Amino acid sequence: MDMVKQRLQLGSSPYKGVLDCVRRVLSEEGFRAFYASYRTTVLMNAPFTAVHFATYEAAKKGLMEVSPESVSDERLVVHATAGAAAGALAAALTTPLDVVKTQLQCQGVCGCDRFVSGSIRDVVRTIIRKDGYRGLMRGWMPRMLFHAPAAAICWSTYEAAKNFFQELNDSNSSGNVT
C-alpha cells in the first residue's frame, strides 16, 4: 500500500485511485512491483527504530534531569518533547533510504527513472549522478515535520496509558490482603 500511496501522490499520477493503481500495476508490472522496495524498507526501518528509541530515552532522561522536582507536573511535556526529538532525528538520518525506497516504488511512472537491477546501490548511484549527494536528502524537512508530531503523540499516549494502568494496578494490589 505504501507503493500505491507514493504513486498516487505523484504530481501527474496516471492513476484514478487506489483500485485503478493496484489493477494497473498488477497487470502492467506484475505482483513483484508491490515489493520492489521491500529490502530498502526493512533496511530503513531498523536504523529508524534504533535511533528513535535511543533518542527518546536519552532525551527523556536529559529533560527529567533539567528540573527533577517538577517532572511529575511536566510529564506530558517531557514525553512529547522527547518523542518529537526522537521522531525528527530518526526521520532525518534515514531520509536517504526513504528517497531510495520512493524511487523504487515510483520507477517508470511520471518520468521517474527505471532501474535495471533494483538494487539500493544502483538507485543511490543514479541519484548521486543526477542530483549529487543533496538528492539523497530530498524531502528531509517534510519527513521530519511529519515524524516529529507523530512521535510526540505516540510517546505521550503510550506513556499516559502506561501510567494509567500502573496506577490502576497499584490501587488494586494495595487493597488486597494476603
Image: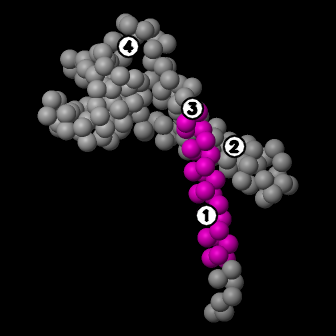
Q: Is residue 111 above or below residue 83?
A: above
Q: Which is nearer the N-term, disc 3 or disc 2?
A: 2
Q: Could you tell me if residue 34 is visible in this image?
A: no
Between residue 63 and residue 107, name the one nearer to us: 107
Amino acid beneath label 3: Met
Assess disc 4: are there few (<14), some (14-19) or many (≥20) residues with their C-alpha within 10 Å of its C-alpha: many
Q: Are marks 2 and 1 in contact (CB under 8 Å)?
A: no
Of helix, strand and loop, which one carries label 4?
A: helix
Residue ID for mark 2: 81
Q: In the image, is 78 to the left or to the right of 147?
A: right
Residue ID for mark 1: 161
Q: Is residue 94 above or below residue 154?
A: above
Q: Residue 67 at what x, y percent from top left?
A: 83, 48
Amino acid beneath label 4: Ile
Q: Which is nearer the N-term, disc 2 or disc 4?
A: 2
Assess disc 2: are there few (<14), some (14-19) or many (≥20) residues with their C-alpha within 10 Å of its C-alpha: many
Of helix, strand and loop, which one carries label 1?
A: helix
132 drawn magenta: no
Q: Which is nearer the N-term, disc 3 or disc 1?
A: 3
Give the spatial CA distance, label 2 vs label 1: 17 Å
Q: Residue 50 at what x, y percent from top left?
A: 50, 40
In the figure, residue 32 lies in which quadrant? top left
In the figure, residue 92 lies in which quadrant? top right
Q: Which is nearer the N-term, disc 2 or disc 1?
A: 2
> Looking at the image, which residue is at 48% across and 37% down?
48
Between residue 49 and residue 9, name the one nearer to us: 9
Which residues are the magenta region?
144-170
Of helix, strand and loop, which one carries label 2?
A: helix
Amino acid beneath label 2: Thr
Q: Which is nearer the N-term, disc 3 or disc 4?
A: 4
Residue ID for mark 4: 127
Query: Which label is found at residue 144?
Result: 3
